[in-house]
Image: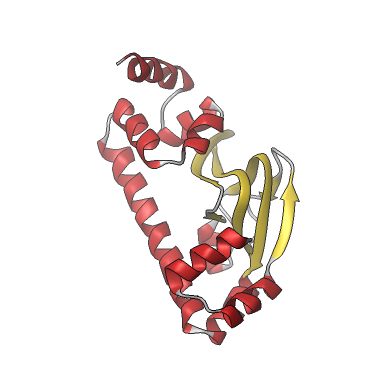
Amino acid sequence: MTELYKILKESVGLVKSEIQSLSAKLKKKEYKAKTTIIREGSIAHKLYFIESGLLRTYHLLEGKEISTYFASDNQFISTYSSFISQTPSLEVLETIEDSTVYELSYQSLLELYKESLRFEKLGRILAEKNYLCVLDRTLTMQTKTAKDKYLDFIENYDPKIIQRTPQHMIASFLGITPESLSRIRKQVFIS
């Protein structure tokens, strides 16, 4: 939890009393690998800060899992559209490996917003980062070749995500087949 406080102090300037208020609302949870945390169709009532581990979101398309986001140590994750709107999720949130997270409920976040402008700033920063991530992903998917998508992925994602995420999940995230990803990886690592 120390890393979370450090991040929040640096990004929004939380003071000791605000950190104490946040601490009272956080719940530490441990999940085994391949645990579904949020199901498609359920409402995402929580935002998660990953202390350690690896999680992803995905949606189902004709029975096939399409990865939409990966997060690892010291990152936030949820099925954001559901969390923000408190409507049924179009995505699934699951662990890829054993993970330890801190949960913050939607209701607790609203209470924190009322308590301090710094928490509102945190909400704005998370929303802005999420928007930029979605925009970047959309442009990447629409404008880049399969090889460039992979190069962009390895340049911009945490090495832990690149090394520990199963290849078929990365391929679905990039919108290519696992076989194409295998060929691209061989080209990239031979070059």
Q: Quadrant of the N terminus?
A: bottom right
- Residue pictured at 33% horizontal, 36% vertical: 152
Residue 54 is left or right of residue 134, and the answer is: right
Image: 69 above or below 180: below
Pinpoint residue 3: horizontal percent, then vertical percent. Answer: 57, 59
The colour scheme is secondary structure
Residue 68: x %, y % from top left: 48, 43
Q: Relative to residue 91, is residue 186 drawn left or right? A: left
Q: Residue at x 64, y 44 (%)?
A: 94
Reply above or below: 20 against 45: below
| Side of 14 where 189 appears, left or right | left
Percent position of residue 69, x then y: 49, 45
Pick the front one: 164 or 1: 1
In this view, the residue in front, 182 or 119, is: 119
Quadrant for residue 132, please give it: bottom left
- The answer to whether 125 is drawn above or below residue 149 in the figure is below
- Camera sees residue 45: no
Between residue 62 and residue 12, name the one nearer to us.
12
**Rendering coords of residue 105 (x, y %):** 65, 68
**Total number of numbered discs in the rendering:** 0
Taking depth in this image into account, of 164 and 64 the one nearest to the observer is 164
Q: Quadrant of residue 76?
A: bottom right
Q: Residue at x 55, y 43 (%)?
A: 58
